[in-house]
Amino acid sequence: MSAILLKNIDVKGVKSDILIEDGVISSVLPAGNEQVADPSAEILDCTGRAALPGFVNMHTHGAMSLMRGIGEDIAFHAWLDKIWEVESKIDEEYVYYATKVACLEMIKTGTTTFNDHYWYMPMAYKAAMEMGLRPVLAYVICDRNDPEESERQKVQCVEMYESSLQWEEPARFCIAIHAIYSVSEEMILWATRFAREHGLRIHIHLSETRKEVEDCKNQHNGMSPVEYLDALGVLGEDVIAAHTLWLSGNDVRILGERKVTCVHNVNSNLKLASGYRFLYNELRDAGANICLGTDGCASSNNLDMLETMKTSAMIQKAWRDDPSAMPLDEIIAMATENAGKALGLPVGRIEGGMAADILIVNTTGYEFLSPGSFEANLVYSAHSDCVESVICNGRFVMRNRVVEGEEEILSQARNILSKII
């Protein structure tokens, strides 16, 4: 792996030189300091550019990239039925090409790591590795209370985990429990035990809709989904809970005490009318780790983390009637370093020893002309096309807005659409 030296690039307001070696940031020094690099290092003058950590999409369903628009203007549970109908038609080939499209979009919009929750994991692995991204891929437990399906999934999960031990860096394996309404209690417990025996993260949809909460209370002696999972011993620092939208004060307390990572998926929640009052301040103050995700394209319609950041911040300000809600440094941390902490990966910060996942942002355009801070202009003024180049794991996956093989990926995806249309 060749070395890269990014010269004269802005890092948190300081013109700096970033040396990348063997997929890792070796050093970040003020520009002009002598950097000792391999003579074969690629040297780039990044004047007029700023460096950001690659964004981390903490909850998505990558292969839904070809399902945009198939369930518009309907409520969540009707939408879910529609999705499951479509998903009954997909296969490995579909997931491979659809995940490639997702990776293409994520690269174009600045995401270098994604926490995926979908079927046919080996195909998602193949696609993500070919595209050069950093995937965290889940085996999805979803038995729908069918004992035969439970046993089949146990066997398959073990097989896929053992296969993942041969994966190349930087891919990671985790366990997904779809949701409390789609997974039997016995399988929730089995999946949790399996994950903890093998040191794996647990990725779950949790308290996404009002109906989910009401149904859970009716079925489990008045307990909310959070209280139910806590009673089962599921919740902990290794749990990544997507949505966590409909929460009581006691739910917030539990999530904070258990140090759960809560993932806000604002655009999906708004579009499906699941809700908008994400309890960011309360969860943060209680001790939960908070990150951002886009959800899948069947509900959010894109995988643009910069758009997610802007919408998340503005909705918080609006419903709280407080313009100081969700400050800029916190919204950026939710998309970067908080996610690195959640996944146990050395990503999300630009400093020596961290993985070389770096966005090169062009700041010469009109979006950055104002006297506002770089962070303000990035989140509130810019669009993701300001991301000029992307480095993941020490390699360029996009240069000057060009991703290798883009046209071929789109052509193959058009052909594969016949499987679900």
Image (cartoon, rainbow, N blue to C red):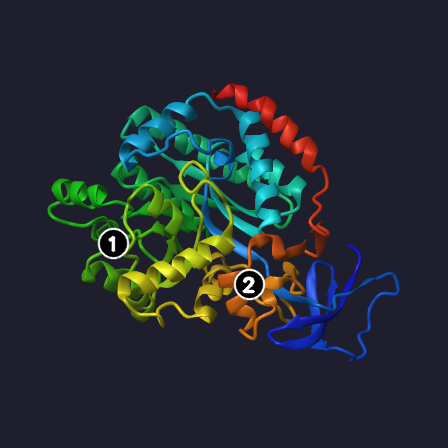
Q: Position of residue 35 (x, y in %)?
A: 80, 74
Q: Is residue 67 visible?
A: yes
Q: Nearer the viewer, residue 384 or 121?
A: 384
Q: Position of residue 367 (x, y in %)?
A: 58, 63
> Element under label 1?
helix
Q: Residue at x 42, y 26 (%)?
A: 87
Q: Position of residue 180 (x, y in %)?
A: 27, 41
Q: How much space separates mark 1 and mark 2, taking CA atoms?
A: 29 Å
Place residue 361 in its image quadrant: bottom right
Instruction: Name the residue furthest right.
Output: 39
Quick check: 210 left or right of 260? left
Say how many tags the image has: 2
Quadrant containing the N terminus in the rendered view: bottom right
Q: Residue at x 28, y 30 (%)?
A: 78
Give the residue pinned by disc 1. 230
Q: Nearer the viewer, residue 392 or 309?
A: 309
Q: Nearer the viewer, residue 246 or 123?
A: 246
Q: Is residue 110 visible?
A: no
Q: Residue at x 33, y 65 (%)?
A: 317
Q: Residue at x 35, y 70 (%)?
A: 323
For marks 1 and 2, the one nearer the N-term is 1
> Element under label 2?
loop
Disc 2 marks which amino acid? Gly
Place residue 146 in its image quadrant: top left
Residue 348 marker = 2
Q: Position of residue 40 (x, y in %)?
A: 87, 61
